[in-house]
Image (tube, helix red, strand yellow):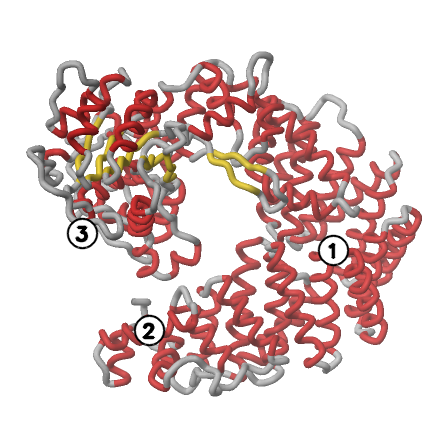
């Protein structure tokens, strides 16, 4: 009701509240849409709103949301709400007649029906929901006229696309929020996620005892993410959990069109299978829109307009116009990348349907080939950018296009285009190296190298050399020094014969790393000096800075800290001048370790924190692990053994996941810290700290490491700035021992529910997302009492 208006005067025409029979389906509780309902109510109440259209892709839940709003209208609108389903209509002229029928308004001789409706509704405060308008968009004009003639009437329509009327406001309905990686560690947080909540609630209809457990949490999260948080897909998936475990269901979602069927009989037929829901919208597309829609399925993730035009274009197909139309029809999504490039994507369910259409039309092979050629061409630029000022740009580009590059690699190998496969594989390999994903990168490179060995056609020397080079780099990162040397020397031989000074310099530098890893310092020195001379001749400032960096690390390994420090300070200064964030992180870490070994922890700590910030900003997991290890050594030297044990365990978990082991000299340094930590703790406390470090989230481990580094290696003492009450500090300390709420209650003599409330308040004050993150904060603040052993078999509650 508008401000200042009183109840509408009663007339002979009454509009009753929405009766249950008007529901378009057996409506259950609306899960996970409280934010959307609140926003929708606000939009309807906004001055000037007359016609509000809910838009979104098929299966996103527009109808359920609209019906929930209409059901609530009895409290917000004096004359309630009415629901009109026009899904069966194909004649726009029939829409206003259906509205009149539902409202009980008859025709009058010589008077247009819309005028009769305006007369009947002129003084009514009513919400009218018109559902499924996709096929009758031309009816928007009459709906707008009806809304314009009735000042207290609000019309809410649902459609795949808006009517495109001046009076209209659009309300895009998004998929449900999906769980994040950190949610999996906290079952309560995972259960509260909207996608998970809907999946679990619908599963209870077929499996009343179904519950989230530590064993199935990751699989449940995977199902929700792979289904894009699409409510219809989640409901259909819930029915399949009667047959499959969550892990089995997640593994089968590559064929979701065949799997997600069997919806309830009391819903419209288009909602009984995922294919039918998408087909309902696909049938409305014009021929050019259908052509582009199915061709876009070859993109494994987002794409730019340039990419779409190159891969999907053909004479007579206006890719720009068709893209704009598909965005309007909610079949494509548009976002803006941080570099201000427009990115387009489609939900995975839509992509699978489009891929089926592409295969059925016999266009799959040709479109995939154009896709592979396009990305192989760009990947060439990425490889030539290594060691140059363009390098950072290419790392960002590869990170954005990893899915497409992998798809291009798969297709190139499948059709035997070895040159294209090597171009793409080399780019992916370098990206894997800079981000620490050594195992992932090596798997891709091994496929390329194996195919290259069997190839019969010629491949350009620079491509061959580049592939051997990055293969050797990844083998070095994985600790396979023999394989690394073999590949690097093959790369070197090819680049010297070409000749290619840039590739020769990089190969020489990494051969120096191999020699340093073996303890052959003289060979390492010769390799580093050769690389440095080549970079000077090339006038390559990045290469020159890396040469200083490598020589500094070699001096550190030889134990000559006096020589290492100025070399590393020099490289750090050069990298800062270049604005080379990843290299700044590497030089900061290297210099920090030198100062740490020199007995200057107060100078080392801020450098290690800066390195951790830099590695985190580019998501270099191996670099993050290096910083954890260095900061663990620093804090162990100050006697904070439990924090050090957690960091060492967190680093070990990262390295295991990345297949990035420590080199022998680094392993020896780490082992010394481990011995110190183990000797400084009781066995049960040590074991608990190790377990906590292995299981804490990456974000929590980073916060712990930064907290240590910010205090120069000491764990901060408890002080007045700790934002918890005395009782909350006691509870938090017990959380850090792994106790459940029940165990905390027994220990402190309080009720389990009271302990639960305390834990909830603690997490809220600290901004923690799990009990593991609370434990990390406790350690960083020095609240944990290592004399209180943790329970032997505690499980998060």
**Apparent side of residue 499 relative to residue 101 in the rendered image (left or right):** right
* Residue 737 drawn above or below residue 342: below
Query: Is residue 597 among the parts visible in the rendering?
Result: yes
Relative to 114, residue 682 above or below: below
Question: Residue 280: x and y, percent?
Answer: 32, 23
Q: CA distance from mark 2 to mark 3?
A: 27 Å
Q: Is residue 617 left or right of residue 522?
A: left
On the rendered image, what quadrant is the C terminus found in?
bottom left
Write the residue at 62% across / 50% down: 438
Task: Provide the secondary structure element on which disc 2 rests.
Answer: helix
Left or right of 635, for residue 767:
left
Q: Which mark is residue 408?
A: none
Left or right for 324, reference 518: left
To which residue does mark 2 refer? 759
Q: In the depicted view, which residue is nearer to us: 376 or 766?
A: 766
Q: Position of residue 271 (x, y in %)?
A: 25, 30
**Could you say which disc has been placed on residue 209 in the image?**
3
Residue at disc 3, secondary structure:
loop
Task: Answer with the quarter of the image where residue 341 lies.
Answer: top right
Please give the name of the residue rendered at 58% of the width and 19% of the height, measured from the top-left corner.
313
Instruction: Identify the residue at horizontal 18%, vertical 18% (top origin).
Output: 111
Circle 1 sits on which residue?
580
């Amino acid at each position: 009701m508008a401000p200042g208006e009183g109840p509408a005067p009663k007339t002979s025409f009454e509009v009753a509240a929405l009766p249950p029979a008007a529901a378009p389906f057996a409506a259950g509780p609306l899960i996970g849409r409280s934010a959307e309902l609140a926003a929708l109510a606000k939009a309807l109440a906004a001055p000037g709103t007359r016609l509000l259209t809910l838009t979104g892709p098929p299966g996103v839940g527009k109808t359920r949301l609209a019906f929930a709003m209409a059901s609530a209208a009895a409290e917000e609108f004096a004359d309630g709400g009415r629901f009109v389903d026009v899904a069966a209509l194909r004649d726009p002229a029939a829409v206003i007649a259906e509205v009149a029928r539902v409202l009980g308004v008859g025709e009058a001789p010589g008077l247009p029906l819309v005028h009769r409706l305006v007369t009947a509704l002129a003084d009514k405060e009513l919400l009218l929901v018109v559902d499924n308008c996709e096929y009758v968009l031309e009816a928007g004009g009459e709906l707008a006229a009806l809304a314009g003639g009735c000042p207290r009437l609000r019309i809410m329509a649902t459609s795949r696309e808006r009517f495109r009327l001046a009076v209209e406001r659009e309300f895009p309905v998004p998929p449900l929020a999906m769980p994040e990686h950190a949610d999996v560690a906290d079952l309560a947080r995972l259960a509260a996620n909207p996608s998970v909540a809907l999946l679990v609630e619908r599963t209870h209809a077929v499996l009343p005892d179904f519950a989230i457990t530590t064993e199935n949490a990751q699989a449940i999260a995977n199902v929700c993410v792979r289904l894009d948080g699409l409510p219809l897909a989640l409901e259909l998936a819930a029915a399949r959990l009667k047959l499959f475990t969550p892990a089995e269901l997640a593994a089968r979602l590559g064929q979701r069109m065949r799997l997600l069927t069997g919806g309830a009989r009391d819903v419209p037929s288009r909602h009984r299978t995922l294919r039918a829901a998408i087909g309902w919208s696909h049938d409305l597309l014009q021929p050019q829109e259908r052509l582009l829609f199915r061709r876009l399925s070859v993109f494994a993730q987002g794409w730019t307009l340039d990419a779409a035009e190159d891969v999907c274009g053909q004479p007579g197909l206006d890719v720009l116009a068709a893209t704009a139309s598909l965005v309007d029809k909610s079949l494509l999504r548009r976002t803006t990348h941080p570099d201000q490039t427009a990115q387009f994507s489609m939900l995975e369910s839509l992509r699978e349907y489009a891929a089926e259409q592409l295969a059925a039309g016999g266009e799959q092979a040709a479109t995939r080939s154009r896709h592979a050629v396009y990305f192989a061409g760009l990947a060439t630029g990425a490889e030539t950018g290594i060691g140059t000022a363009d390098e950072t740009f290419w790392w960002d580009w590869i990170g954005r296009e990893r899915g497409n590059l992998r798809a291009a690699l798969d297709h190139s190998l499948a059709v035997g285009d070895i040159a294209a496969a090597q171009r793409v594989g080399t780019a992916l390999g370098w990206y894997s190296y800079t981000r620490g994903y050594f195992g992932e990168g090596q798997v891709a490179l091994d496929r390329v190298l194996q195919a290259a060995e069997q190839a019969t056609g010629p491949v350009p020397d620079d491509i061959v050399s580049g592939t051997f080079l990055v293969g050797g780099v990844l083998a070095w990162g994985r600790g396979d020094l023999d394989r690394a040397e073999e590949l690097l020397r093959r790369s070197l031989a090819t680049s010297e014969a070409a000749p290619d000074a840039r590739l020769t310099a990089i190969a020489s530098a990494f051969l120096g790393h191999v020699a340093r890893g073996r303890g052959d310092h003289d060979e390492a020195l010769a390799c580093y000096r050769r690389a440095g001379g080549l970079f000077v001749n090339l006038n390559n400032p990045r290469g020159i800075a890396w040469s200083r960096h490598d020589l500094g690390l070699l001096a550190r390994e030889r134990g000559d800290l006096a020589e290492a420090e100025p070399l590393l300070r020099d490289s750090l200064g050069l990298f800062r001048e270049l604005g080379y964030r990843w290299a700044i992180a590497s030089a900061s870490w290297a210099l920090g370790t030198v100062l740490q070994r020199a007995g200057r922890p107060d100078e080392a700590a801020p450098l290690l924190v800066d390195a951790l910030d830099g590695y985190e900003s580019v998501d270099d997991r191996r670099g993050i692990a290096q910083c954890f290890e260095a900061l663990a050594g620093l804090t162990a030297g100050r006697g904070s053994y439990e924090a050090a044990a957690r960091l060492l365990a967190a680093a070990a978990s990262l390295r295991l996941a990345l297949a990035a082991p420590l080199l022998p000299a680094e392993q020896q340094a780490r082992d010394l810290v481990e011995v110190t930590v183990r000797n400084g703790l009781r066995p049960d406390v040590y074991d608990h700290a190790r377990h906590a470090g292995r299981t804490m989230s990456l974000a929590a481990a980073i916060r712990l490491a930064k907290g240590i580094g910010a205090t120069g290696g000491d764990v901060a003492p408890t002080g007045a700035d700790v934002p918890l009450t005395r009782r909350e500090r006691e509870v938090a300390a017990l959380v850090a021992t792994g106790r459940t709420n029940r165990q905390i209650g027994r220990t402190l003599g309080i009720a389990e529910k009271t302990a639960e409330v305390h834990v909830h308040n603690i997490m809220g004050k600290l901004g923690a997302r799990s009990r593991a993150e609370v434990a990390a904060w406790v350690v960083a603040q020095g609240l944990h009492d290592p004399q209180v052993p943790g329970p032997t078999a505690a499980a998060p509650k």
